[in-house]
Image (cartoon, grey):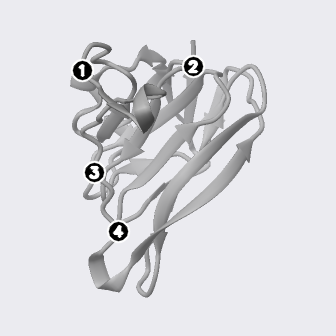
């Protein structure tokens, strides 16, 4: 049996850049005042990529139940035709388990703790675990692709490989 223990790292733009983008209010002084001054619009660098093979962006709402740690990974997935963006409605911590796009390599997995006020966008083809959260049920607005073509590949981790996520 091969045992791999992944420790959660606090997410940062630099550490996550190979896998996608972090969405958070980083430039608090850089905003545009709109709606007669009642609203501050903060720009993000997040790119929504859904157009391949005639796809279109759709908005879904996910509600995810919290997990306890340690947590054993059983599978990973990727979306080869699009990005997938998770914007938190509820301010709870979540977890992003990722591996670079391309062939899945179990030894290249990374585990990130996503803070309560942070959200993420997985880049096209990035391997990631399905949505995980801690502490309480968490709702997400998800921007994803709808359209023709196969846009979800899954990798099932063999039973003789134990990958565990820990604090």
* Secondary-structure class at tag 3: loop
Residue 50 is marked as 4
What is the CA distance from the residue labelled 2 to the residue labelled 1? 22 Å
Q: Which mark is residue 122?
A: none
Quarter of the rendering occupied by the N terminus = top right
> Disc 4 vs disc 3: Cβ atoms closer than 8 Å?
no
Q: Residue at x 47, y 25 (%)?
A: 118
Q: Earlier in the sequence, mark 3 or mark 2?
A: 3
Q: Residues within 10 Å of mark 1 (few under 14, many from 20)?
A: few
Give the CA distance from mark 3 to mark 2. Answer: 21 Å
The vertical placement of 106 against 23, above or below, is below
Check if mark 4's residue and mark 2's residue have beta carbons within 8 Å: no
| Residue plotted at (25% across, 58% down) | 102
How many circles with numbers are drawn on the protein?
A: 4
Secondary structure at numbered mark 4: loop
Depth order, front residue of 161/6:
6
Q: Residue at x 66, y 53 (%)?
A: 61
CA distance for labels 1 and 3? 19 Å
- Is residue 75 in sight in this rendering? no
Query: Mark 1, mark 4: which one is toward the viewer?
Result: 1
Residue 50 position, x and y percent, is 35, 68
Residue 156 left/right relative to 123: right
Is 4 in front, or is 14?
14
Crowd around label 2: few <14 · some 14–19 · many ≥20 (10 Å): some
C-alpha distance separating marks 4 and 2: 26 Å
The answer for how far apart the CA atoms under marks 4 and 3 are is 10 Å
Q: Which residue is mark 2?
A: 116
Q: Label 1 belongs to which residue?
A: 30
- The residue carrying pointer 3 sits among few (fewer than 14), some (14 to 19) or many (20 or more) residues within 10 Å by Cα, namely some
In the rendered image, the quadrant that contains the C terminus is: top right
């Amino acid at each position: 049996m091969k045992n791999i223990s992944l420790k959660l790292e606090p997410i940062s733009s630099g550490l996550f850049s190979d896998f996608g983008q972090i969405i958070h209010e980083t430039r608090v002084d850089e905003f545009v005042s709109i709606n007669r001054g009642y609203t501050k619009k903060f720009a993000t660098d997040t790119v929504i990529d859904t157009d391949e093979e005639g796809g279109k962006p759709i908005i879904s709402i996910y509600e995810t139940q919290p997990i306890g740690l340690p947590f054993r990974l059983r599978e990973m997935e990727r979306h080869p035709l699009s990005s997938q963006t998770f914007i938190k409605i509820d301010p709870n911590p979540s977890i992003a388990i990722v591996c670079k796009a391309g062939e899945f390599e179990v030894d290249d997995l990374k585990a990130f703790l996503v803070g309560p006020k942070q959200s993420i966008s997985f880049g096209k083809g990035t391997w990631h675990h399905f949505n995980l959260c801690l502490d309480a049920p968490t709702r997400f607005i998800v921007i994803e692709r709808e359209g023709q073509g196969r846009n979800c590949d899954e990798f099932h981790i063999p039973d003789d490989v134990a990958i565990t996520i820990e604090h």
